[in-house]
Image (cartoon, grey):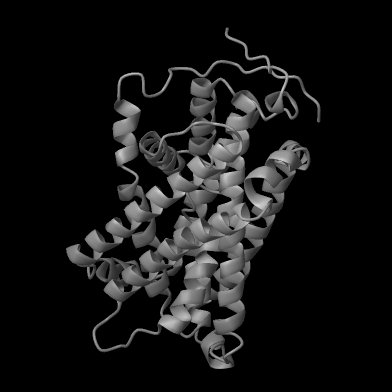
Amino acid sequence: MSTFSPRPGPDSVTAAPTNRGMLKPAWQLALRWVLTLGLLGAVVVYLDTEALVVRLGQLSPGIVALALAITVVQVVVSAWRWRYTSARLGLELPLGPAIGEYYLATFLNQLLPGGVMGDVNRAWRHGRDSRKQVSAANAVLIERFSGQLVMAAVSAVLLVAWWPFSAGAVSETSVNSLEPGQGWLVFTVPAILIAGGLIGLIFRRPLIRYLYHLRADLTRSLLVWPVVAVQIGASLVVVGSYLAVFLLLAWGLAEPGTGFPWQTLLPLSAALLLAMALPVTVAGWGVREGMAAVLWPLAGLAPEQGVALSVAYGLLVLVSSLPGAVVLLKPGGVASAAPEVQVEERI
């Protein structure tokens, strides 16, 4: 069993969560699969699946190809942001390998519960190569935090500026027009998401303590000028690509002659992005579709349209992450078992 002992210097100031510490017990992983399948099952039971399939069949290959091209830009900019963050912490990370590792992390996040195990692997592989486990873990955590922070801010602005509720789109008529099953979803899905989010926070208490002791690296790689401007700029491009893919797919799924209410679809898509950030299911499946089934009819739109958009987005992300499988299959691409990392606990 190999052991890592931090040397004097920045890497020994803060103990990063170990690989074993960040891995979830089997029952937690199983619970996320159950929750994912349960939410998807509820959506399937209470919606017109035939109409859903018909809408998905409307997507043209050209729309899909263009959306996949946008995801390439998304991954490249995200990898560059990770490289920039790592450089601020004194770590070398060439852009080419960073892109490959980012694809691999995205691919693993699509298959493993929680949506972060690919990033755990990304941090471990970088720390293994650089022999600076703590700084590598901090770089990944700060890079993800930067993206999530900007995504939350952009989503909040969109929801406040264009939220259909405030524009009167959610009327008594639209609420009363819900089918009995959809009305059940209006109360059940948000309740499940809130409970799941609280459970996720409880199980992340060690990570919260770790974040408190992360202040020095956080300042160097995110909170000082002009670093903060660079991080925000890169994250804005990434979030913009998320929303662009949503709108492009929504345009491809729209029925001819029905119009394209992008002013409404943009904040709704932002709401789906926020829901996907909750680490309660596998790759956001179930959460995303459940929220779409609730929000679209409340905004006066067909729930099948929102769920079809959610499913199309999930499948597109999965397909766009397939280059990560190539990285996974490369000789020596992933160790068969990560070594146990032992660091001095100072939290």
76 sits left or right of 296 in the view: left
Q: 66 or 43: which is nearer to us? A: 66
Can residue 277 be seen?
Answer: no
Q: Assign the N terminus to one quadrant of the image.
A: top right
Quadrant in the rendering for residue 254: bottom left
Quadrant, the C terminus: top right
Residue 19: horizontal and vertical position, in percent? Answer: 60, 26
Residue at (44, 44) in percent of width and height: 79
As displayed, is residue 322 above or below residue 250?
A: above
Let me know if residue 91 appears in the view: yes
Q: State the residue lying farthest toward the right.
A: 347
Q: Residue furthest left?
A: 61
Vertical position of residue 298 compared to residue 330: above or below: below
Instruction: Name the one closer to the observer, 70 or 197.
Output: 70
**Can you say whether 287 is above or below 346 in the image?**
below
Q: Residue at x 40, y 85 (%)?
A: 261
Q: How many marks?
A: 0
Residue drawn at (43%, 19%), measured in percent from left and top?
335
Who is closer to the viewer here, 275 or 190?
Answer: 275
Residue most extreme to the top: 1
